[in-house]
Image (cartoon, rainbow, N blue to C red):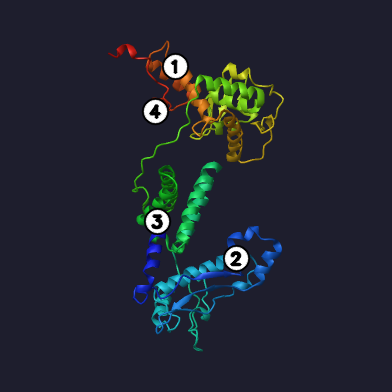
Amino acid sequence: MQSISLLLRAVHVSVHDLPMKLNYNTPKLYTGGIDISRWNKLSKAEQKEALSKEWYLYYSFRDSKTKKLVRQSNIKAGVNLLKTKEERVECLEILKINLLHLLRRGFDPNEKNTALINEVLKIEKTVEPEVTFPATAIAPQASETKIEVPVISIPHEMTIREAFDFGLKIKAKVINKTSYSGLQGRINRFLKWLDLDGSSINGISTLDKKTIINYLNLVLENTSARNRNNTRIDLSSLVTVLVDNEIIKDNIVTSINTLKSTPERNKTYSTNQEIALLKYLQENDEILLLFIQFIYYNFLRPVEVCRLKIGDLDLKGKKLFVRAKNKAVKIKIIPQKLIDLLPDISKMNSTDYLFTPTQIGGEWDAEEKNRRDHFSKRFRTVKDQFQLGKDYGLYSFRHTSITNLYKELNKTLTPFETKSTLMQITGHQTMEALEKYLRDIDAALPEDYSHLLK
């Protein structure tokens, strides 16, 4: 992939006459002189101008005498009779796939290709016609002789890009928007990397384990082990969709190892820090203070607080309905201490968000990720006042509250009773998960053991 491309480029001069070279380059689309990926950003006038030009497929083939690639005749195949961008691109993509199919089977635009044509017609004679190849697509450039090719249909497997685009469409229907956004970003970055040497238009069966390992190594080199592992998970998730839909046979990603990575966790606030922060917020930002109190008293994650709507709070029953990451809805008890801090919400619209940038209860037309980022950035200005580093954040209030609660319960209960009670409050699914969490935030520290030292 990218690394081998650099190597091949370095040795190109000394081996350019070797016979292992392909006799053709990858066919390309000419789309009226504009970048088709920017189509939606073009004005109506610019789109109209692009459609007024000739669109076509072009490629080069190696001359048998000079050994150099020679540009062949443009292939239009009636594409310019189509009126929309989508129709033209679809037609050209089909032509490109079929042309590549022929080139890989030995098609030579400078020869008659009689054996190949007979072979194709023999194989495809029972298949419903789909694509017509005009004579210009296979006729010699400098010859007046034309070969009339009947309507044929060439079956082809999905390209890597087509298969991954299909997988993304399936994923968009089964996971939430936030998760899909992250998945889509990682998959598109992988496809763009494949585009560097044209591999994305190869058949999906050509995608191998080595290619994915090379890309994961590149991600590791440029980012972190954690991001590399997350990329591996997303690739594996998408390939699983392709396996389930019988587009490929096996998931080659599952056999790639996961690297050890140290997760970044926010630190717990000290008692003095906690008091100072809450006092400052009470005087300067009451909305952010209440946002944090939902994290602190109800042990919610910041993104879960962002999801809350007025209708999610049952104050009479002291219940809170939370749309969590790991299940559709979970019910939590609202402590009276938090209820006492709330304004009157009885007359508010049940579909409004509980937290908005300017008020408690209101409309907020923004994606979930943007709502969460708003409060993270808002708290960052508070952190700057206290010169707190990146190890502290909104999550730190959740860690701090659970630590305080653990210490308080541990005064009168056995360790097992403490964790059993705490597990019901925090919402951890298993005792093992809670114990790991407590170890990670250093909540379960021993008492002073000076008397044991000699």
Query: Quick one: 193 or 252, which is closer to the camera?
Result: 193
Q: Residues within 10 Å of mark 4 (few under 14, many from 20)?
A: few
Which residue is tagged 4? 436
First in sequence: mark 2 or mark 4?
2
First in sequence: mark 2 or mark 1?
2
**Farthest-out residue, bottom:** 144
Residue at horizontal 70 percent and vertical 27 percent from the top: 348
First in sequence: mark 2 or mark 3?
2
First in sequence: mark 3 or mark 4?
3
Which residue is tagged 1? 407
Query: Quick one: 238 or 71, which is closer to the camera?
Result: 71
Q: Residues within 10 Å of mark 1 (few under 14, many from 20)?
A: some
Q: Quadrant of the C terminus?
A: top left
Q: Secondary structure at mark 1?
A: helix
Are the two marked residues, 3 and 4, in contact with CB atoms closer than 8 angstroms?
A: no
First in sequence: mark 4 or mark 1?
1
The CA span between labels 2 and 3 is 28 Å
Residue 178 against residue 70 in the figure, above or below: above
Q: Amino acid at mark 3?
A: Ile
Of tags 3 and 4, the one toward the viewer is 4
Q: Amino acid at mark 2?
A: Glu
Query: Quick one: 299 or 151, which is closer to the camera?
Result: 299
Q: Is residue 425 left or right of residue 80?
A: left
Q: Amino acid at mark 1?
A: Lys
Q: Position of residue 322 (x, y in %)?
A: 55, 29
Q: Secondary structure at mark 3?
A: loop
Residue at horizontal 49 percent and vertical 71 percent from the top: 27
The label on residue 87 is 2
